[in-house]
Image (cartoon, helix red, strand yellow):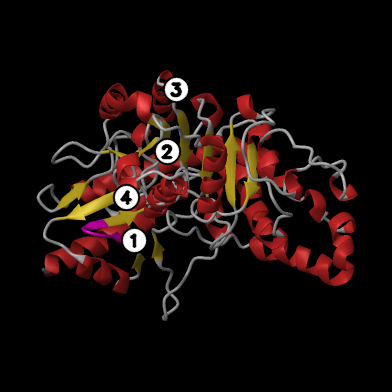
Amino acid sequence: MSDYKLGVAYALEQDHKDDLKAYRQQFHIPKDAAGNNWIYMTGNSLGLQPKSTKSYINEELEDWANLGVEGHTQGKTPWLSYHELLTDKMAQIVGAKSQEVIVMNTLTANLHFMMVSFYKPSKTRFKIVIESDAFPSDKYAVQSQLRHHGFDDNEGLVLWKPRQDEVLLRHEDLETILEDQGDEIALILIGGVNYYTGQFLDLKRITQLGHKYNCVVGFDCAHGAGNVALKLHDSGADFAVWCTYKYLNAGPGSLGGCFVHERHAHKKDLNRFTGWWSHNKQTRFNMRDEFDQLPGAEGWQLSNPPILSMAAIKASLDMFHEVGMSKLITKSKKLTGYLEFLLKQLGENTIRIITPYNTNERGCQLSIQVKNANKALHDKLTNEGVISDWRAPDVIRCAPVPLYNSFADVYHLVEKLKAILNEQ
């Protein structure tokens, strides 16, 4: 879309024509002390709460109060199989088959559980490739895995870096890494959408490259799930993990998700940590049976899940299912494109957008560098009612989320930024 226009009238017109505008009213928009809505641009860190979430959780609290343990089988939504209610809708969001997806644990815990199964180092093939500016928790996790297996984490960690004076990754440079060290690399673990730049990488291309050199390939999709078309099954990746508290609006610290490609579904000899929830459902409560592995992603579960967290996830997934990722992505591209258009009016000598311009290489986050600015600029924006996200050394991340952000939000964000810059 290239026919964006200046002025608030255009923003209001786009909001009026927006097919998804009613969904904004289905979220709690935080307010300042005077009762004015914040301009909330941090759905990439913590999504807003759907108004329906409370009723979903309250239903389970009522069943717990009224039924006690019998809620596992007699509740309105029996807890024993509750996680199964999330599977199909989550699979649709990440582009996977239902058998390939499970909601469980939290993000970095799931990353470790996946590496227990898929990081199988030898003396000669033990290295792990990550992006040089990976989310810190990913880096810490893979370093600890290297140490756990007896390797030097400095020697074993291979960084895929941007070129000098660039901020975005080039797939050609990953190809060079594999050409040089492919027979030493056991695992490629990449953030599908980079948390800092917002770059959406080509998952299928990375997977095909890794498999060419017999490397296992996994992705951290924390910034991709609910934001971009991940198409995890088609990518061919061995595994992926994500959280639900960003674009999926399931609340702080809520459960994460895992994808395990169907070719691994029946590999009972694949090393993994296990628990009673990965045991055959039909005999799970016999207690004294020998372990019988569940097929598919469910076979990576350990314990019975926290229902209250799953209720919040269900509230959000039901909304996503109603809207559909296709409509969300269409609006996301329009909304983010509009933000890009307005920011460019401030002048390239003032503003630099480090997120890719190609809409197929990004989601709804734009990472903005402002010349000669520091965190004081971000603090001034916050004082003006704009909730954005500062990432050192010099980036403000803004994510106009299509479910609840508006064109007017984007317009007023840029107007406030412009006013602050004019004061300096």
Q: Label 4, label 3: how many angstroms apart (C-alpha)?
A: 29 Å
Which of the two residues, 424 or 67, is positioned nearer the viewer here? Answer: 67
CA–CA distance between discs 4 and 2? 16 Å
User: Is the residue marked by circle 1 packed among few (<14), some (14-19), or many (20+) residues within 10 Å?
Assistant: many
Q: Residue 214: horizontal and vertical position, in percent?
A: 45, 22
Residue type at mark 4: give it.
Answer: Tyr
Residue 287 spot, x, y in % from top left: 86, 50
Q: Nearer the viewer, mark 3 or mark 2?
A: 3
Image quarter of the N terminus: top left
Q: Position of residue 233 (x, y in %)?
A: 56, 28
- In what quadrant of the picture does the C terminus appear? bottom left
Q: Quadrant of residue 423?
A: bottom left
Query: What residue appears at the point 66 percent right and 55 percent down from the top-left corner?
Result: 315
- Mark toward the start of the polypeptide (4 vs 3): 4
Give the residue drawn at x 49%, y 51%.
247
Q: Amino acid at mark 1?
A: Asp
Please state if 377 lies on the left or on the right of 289 as rendered.
Answer: left
Residue bearing mark 3: 214
Badge 2: how crowded within 10 Å, few (<14), some, or many (20+)?
Answer: many
Residues at discs 3 and 1 in contact (Cβ within 8 Å): no
Is residue 178 placed above or below 243 in the rendered structure?
A: above
**What's the distance in space between the residues labelled 3 and 1, CA to CA?**
38 Å
Tell me if residue 240 is in the magenta stretch.
Answer: no
Which one is in front in this view, the residue at disc 3 or the one at disc 1?
A: 3
In the rendered image, which residue does mark 4 sit on?
196
Calculate the distance from the C-alpha at mark 1 to the C-alpha at mark 4: 10 Å
Mark toward the viewer: 1 or 2? 2
Look at mark 1 in the image and give the residue it sits on. 389
The magenta segment = 389-395
Q: Earlier in the sequence, mark 1 or mark 4?
A: 4
